[in-house]
């Protein structure tokens, strides 16, 4: 498999550089597995040049202490692994005596802590009593978000409040995802984004010249596909008892967006559902989508890969529909395309923000509008100039007639918005458009988005 070029993460690299300049300090990096934490940290290490890197294993304390000492010795601290260290703080203190300025990265610390909870307390002792007197930067990385909350970054955690830098690594934007696919047209880049979200690992599995449906079959649906069980794996890693979380996610994927509709769909009391949702939200697996002029948000699956898996793969897998990677059943293709249409609304939201960053559009607030049966995909409010941008998002190929009709409907819906004194601007975001442009609505297609092939 070709190793892909390093994409984006400029902000994260800058934050790590800032931390490095203000050492001694502790930096914490966490986020779901496959999101690119290790790659980010190694990229940064190669830039600063004086890094010790250790990847912890889910094993006994002694094993991790011994292996960490060995990694330190291999980084050039001679004889370091000859001593036996009783605790992590003793080891780190010994290291502090031996090195001047350096960065020590402990990757997958969450596996170490899950196996040996005392590791967090020992690290805290070192941070509280020794780190300040050194020239070290300690970088703690973890994939198990629940463990990182409990032991490192959350209130009440041993290391709570001690990290100068705390970064949760998020999915790449659709525009960065485009960089993985120089051979694809922008429509197919949107499909790839709908398939794997902004998780770089999944994109790096796609082979040159593959189209989205091929990637779906070969990487997700086929009996031996590498990502067929990935969603289950993620849930089993985070939760001892994943079944209720699984059911909640499944219900959301099937269209339940409020705690009460989820509760009645899975037969669990509403209050319990709220608790499960709060946990899923804190882990970044679900989120509440902003609904303008309303306190209630609609729940949706935030992790793009899980959203795809529960919408597209799970129903096929549960029904035992066989998929060979040569021929995808039409049910799979059409449910995937429906999922793409759904995801396109999020891409359109990214696009609106991109327009704002590039100065083409101004607004202070953005979200969906839902009120008494009236729905507008995106409303963006410019409170200063009192302008409301109303956006209809359509994953289809429109002509002039379609667009005229959509603009008319949008205008009618505008009357339901509680925005007196605002002027409105209409926008249609669609896959493609042919015909004369309209006077009363701006039309944007995927070709206007920064998704095109990078120039060679
Ligand atoms: N910014 C990036 N650009 C290109 N590829 C990336 C990037 N981040 C991660 N990858 C690729 O994705 C895969 C998973 O990344 P990794 O850093 O191992 O994730 P994590 O440590 O969060 O589980 C690796 O193959 C890596 O090369
Ligand atoms: Mg990693």
Image (tube, helix red, strand yellow):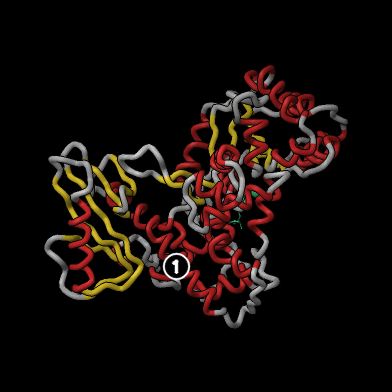
Instruction: Kindly tell me whether residue 209 is visible in this rendering.
Output: yes
Identify the residue shown where x is 45% and y is 62%: 179
Q: Which residue is mark 1?
A: 338
Where, by quadrant of the figure, is residue 231 drawn?
A: bottom right
On the image, the x and y values in percent for residue 143 come to 64, 44
Please state which of residues 70 and 369 is positioned toward the viewer in this rendering: 369
Q: Is residue 281 left or right of residue 56?
A: left
Q: Is residue 112 left or right of residue 453?
A: right
Q: Is residue 359 left or right of residue 176?
A: left
Vertical relation: 141 (above or below) 136: below
On the image, the x and y values in percent for residue 163 come to 58, 27
Instruction: Kindly tell me whether residue 352 is visible in this rendering.
Output: no
Q: Mark 1, residues whose alpha carbon is within 10 Å: few (<14), some, or many (≥20)?
A: some
Q: Quadrant of the C terminus?
A: bottom left
Q: Quadrant of the N terminus?
A: bottom right
Q: Secondary structure at mark 1?
A: helix
Where, by quadrant of the figure, is residue 109 drawn?
A: top right
Vertical relation: 328 (above or below) 347: below
Identify the residue shown where x is 83% and y is 35%: 61
Q: Is residue 15 left or right of residue 309?
A: left
On the image, the x and y values in percent for residue 52 come to 68, 39
Q: Quadrant of ligand 1?
A: bottom right
Please state which of residues 387 and 267 is positioned toward the viewer in this rendering: 267
Vertical relation: 215 (above or below) 278: below
Identify the residue shown where x is 53% and y is 61%: 308
The residue positioned farthest toward the bottom in the image shown: 327
Vertical relation: 456 (above or below) 130: below
């Amino acid at each position: 498999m070709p190793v892909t070029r390093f994409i984006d993460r400029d902000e994260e690299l800058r934050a790590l550089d800032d931390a490095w300049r203000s050492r001694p300090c502790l930096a914490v990096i966490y986020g779901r597995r496959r999101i690119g934490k290790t790659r980010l940290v190694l990229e940064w290490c190669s830039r600063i040049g004086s890094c010790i890197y250790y990847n912890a294993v889910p094993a006994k304390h002694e094993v991790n202490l011994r292996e960490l000492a060995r990694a330190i010795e291999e980084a050039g601290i001679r004889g370091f692994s000859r001593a036996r260290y009783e605790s992590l703080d003793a080891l780190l203190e010994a290291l502090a005596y031996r090195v001047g300025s350096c960065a020590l990265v402990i990757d997958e610390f969450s596996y170490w802590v899950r196996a040996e909870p005392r590791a967090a307390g020992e690290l805290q002792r070192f941070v509280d009593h020794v780190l300040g007197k050194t020239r070290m930067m300690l970088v703690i990385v973890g994939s198990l978000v629940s463990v990182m909350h409990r032991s490192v970054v959350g209130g009440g955690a041993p290391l709570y409040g001690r990290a100068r830098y705390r970064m949760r690594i998020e999915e790449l934007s659709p525009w960065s995802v485009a960089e993985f696919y120089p051979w694809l047209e922008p429509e197919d880049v949107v499909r790839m984004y709908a398939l794997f979200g902004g998780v770089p690992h999944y994109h790096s599995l796609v082979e040159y010249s593959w189209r989205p449906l091929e990637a779906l079959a070969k990487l997700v649906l086929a009996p031996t596909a590498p990502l067929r069980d990935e969603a289950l794996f993620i849930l089993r890693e985070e939760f001892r008892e994943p079944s209720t979380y699984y059911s909640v996610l499944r219900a959301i994927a099937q269209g339940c967006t409020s705690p009460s509709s989820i509760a009645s769909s899975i037969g669990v009391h509403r209050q319990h559902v709220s608790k499960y949702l709060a946990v899923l939200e804190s882990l970044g697996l679900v989120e509440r989508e902003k609904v303008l002029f309303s306190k209630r948000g609609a729940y949706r699956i935030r992790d793009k890969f899980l959203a795809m898996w529960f919408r597209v793969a799970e129903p096929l897998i549960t029904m035992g529909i066989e998929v060979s990677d040569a021929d995808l059943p039409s049910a799979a293709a059409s449910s995937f395309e429906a999922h793409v249409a759904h995801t396109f609304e999020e891409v359109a939201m990214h696009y609106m923000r991109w327009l704002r960053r590039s100065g083409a559009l101004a607004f202070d607030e953005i979200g969906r509008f839902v009120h008494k049966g009236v729905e507008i995909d995106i409303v963006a409010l410019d409170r200063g100039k009192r302008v409301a941008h109303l956006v209809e998002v359509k994953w289809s190929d429109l002509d002039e007639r379609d667009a005229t009709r959509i603009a008319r409907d949008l205008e009618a819906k505008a009357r339901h918005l509680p925005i007196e004194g605002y002027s409105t601007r209409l926008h249609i975001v669609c896959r493609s458009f042919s015909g004369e442009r309209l006077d009363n609505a701006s039309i944007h297609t995927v070709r206007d988005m920064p998704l095109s092939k990078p120039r060679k």
